[in-house]
Amino acid sequence: MDIEFLLNGETIRLTTAPTRTLLEWLREERDLKGTKEGCNEGDCGACTVVVQDESGIKALNACILFLPQLHGKAVRTVEALGSNGLHPVQTAMIEHHGSQCGFCTPGIVASLVAGHAQGRTDYDTVLAGNLCRCTGYAPIIRAAQAAEGTERPEWIEEDRQKLSTLTTPAPFAPQTSDELAAWYVDHPDAQLIAGATDVGLWVTKQLRDLPSVAFLGKCTDLQDIRDLGDHLWIGAAVTMTALRSALLESHPAYAELVRRYASEQVRNAATIGGNIANGSPIGDNPPALIAMGAQLQLRQGDARRNLALEDFFIDYGKQDRRSGEFVEAVLIPKIVPDLKCYKISKRFDQDISAVLGCFNVTVENGTVTAARIAFGGMAATPKLATHAMQAMVGETWSAETINRAKAAMDKDFRPISDMRASAGYRLGVAKSLFDRYFAERAGQAVNVLEVRA
């Protein structure tokens, strides 16, 4: 693929394999060794770079970022984050002793520089995807605070203006969902790549060859969020960052769950459609969306069909998706006032859930009139707790009803034991989340340590 982008202010034109990563190219071809390889799977943040496009500036993991995804964008590595010298963040890191062993420092600096450009001060979130092996986050936070209010470097505006001068036509990348649909019918075995936060690991960890791919970053209509009255239409290519921002006020419980979804770098790339289409039983999105009553819009050529999201997941690794059919959008209710989402993991940030429980129970005049309760990590697919729900609907909203629902959970799930949790722990903590939901609905304070892994 022939691509063109800016690297540290310089126009780069090159021919590349579709799945060569930015990290590999930076280190092996450009001798830019400041961008480190740590985990090579988007977890540690040592490879973080700053990327700018028409949507703004963001931090991304170079280790799972394919070079064609950079076409028409601007990349800055740690070597070129300042203007005629160091960036204020770098100066503050020196003055406040924020660099310890130094291995993770370039990625931390890149994340903070992106946050600085955005005017961010929520440093726990900005840095959640950067693991400091020396465990000394305090001086790093002090450095970030010291850099607040300092001027943004000149290269931000310079790069933005230079982007309009790039002239190389885009490699094959459908520009609209119509173009994608027509092409995918004829190439049903091709791999569709949006954020590559999952596909990237197929290449870096499984060493898989992907002979036919299509990058979806130019399908701007799949990045839309549309108001349909009672529902929101969320395009499959909407990133988790954009989704959280859009739903922060209307769906606060879901937005808070999304804040704990991977890391800032991953959320900036990962898409809602990609997360659903990969079919993981421990993905954090599907249980919440199922609890909301979300529907999936699938497209095959000019034909579209909608189905309840829970019906999309047939078995482990198997989804109801036909040849040449792709996830086009997710439809969710515009308001879900009774939704609560509980992510149970060993680390608060940047960790895979041992159990994820999402509750959406409607109570009218003291009686449960509707209930949608979904779990991840409890079965081969994200799944509704149907027996527990049946034990609640039509009953008085009370502790006794909650206890009957908990007992019914034994019919709903037979979880497995693995490295994250035992089967007994999973079932026990899932049941305890019913108590937590009931207590929170009653306005009672909850000791989260009682239900935390």
Image: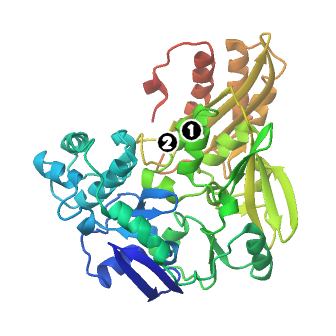
Q: Residue at x 77, y 55 (%)?
A: 312
List the single residue furthest toward the bottom: 15
Say which element carries label 2: helix
Asked whether residue 446 is in view, the answer is yes
Rendered-image quadrant of the C terminus: top left
The residue closer to the viewer here, 139 or 402, is 139
Q: Which residue is mark 1?
A: 255
Find out whether the residues at labels 2 and 1 contact each other: C-beta distance under 8 Å.
yes
The residue closer to the viewer here, 353 or 304, is 304
Q: Is residue 178 above or below residue 151?
A: below
Q: What type is the residue that disc 1 sits on?
A: Ala
Instruction: Please provide percent x and percent y for residue 279.
Output: 66, 58
State the image quarter where residue 230 is shown.
top right
Rendered-image quadrant of the N terminus: bottom right
Q: Is residue 239 above or below residue 150?
A: below
Compared across the picture, whether 450 is left or right of 338 comes to left
State the image quarter where residue 120 is shown.
top left
Q: Residue at x 55, y 58 (%)?
A: 270
Instruction: Please provide percent x and percent y for residue 271.
Output: 59, 57
Q: Which residue is mark 2?
A: 259
Instruction: Please provide percent x and percent y for residue 84.
Output: 19, 65
Color encoding of the figure: rainbow
Q: What type is the residue that disc 2 sits on?
A: Arg
Q: Residue at x 68, y 25 (%)?
A: 338
Q: Is residue 158 above or below residue 225?
A: below
The residue closer to the viewer here, 245 or 258, is 245
Compared across the picture, whether 192 is left or right of 24 comes to right
Asked whether residue 427 is in view, the answer is no
Say which element carries label 1: helix
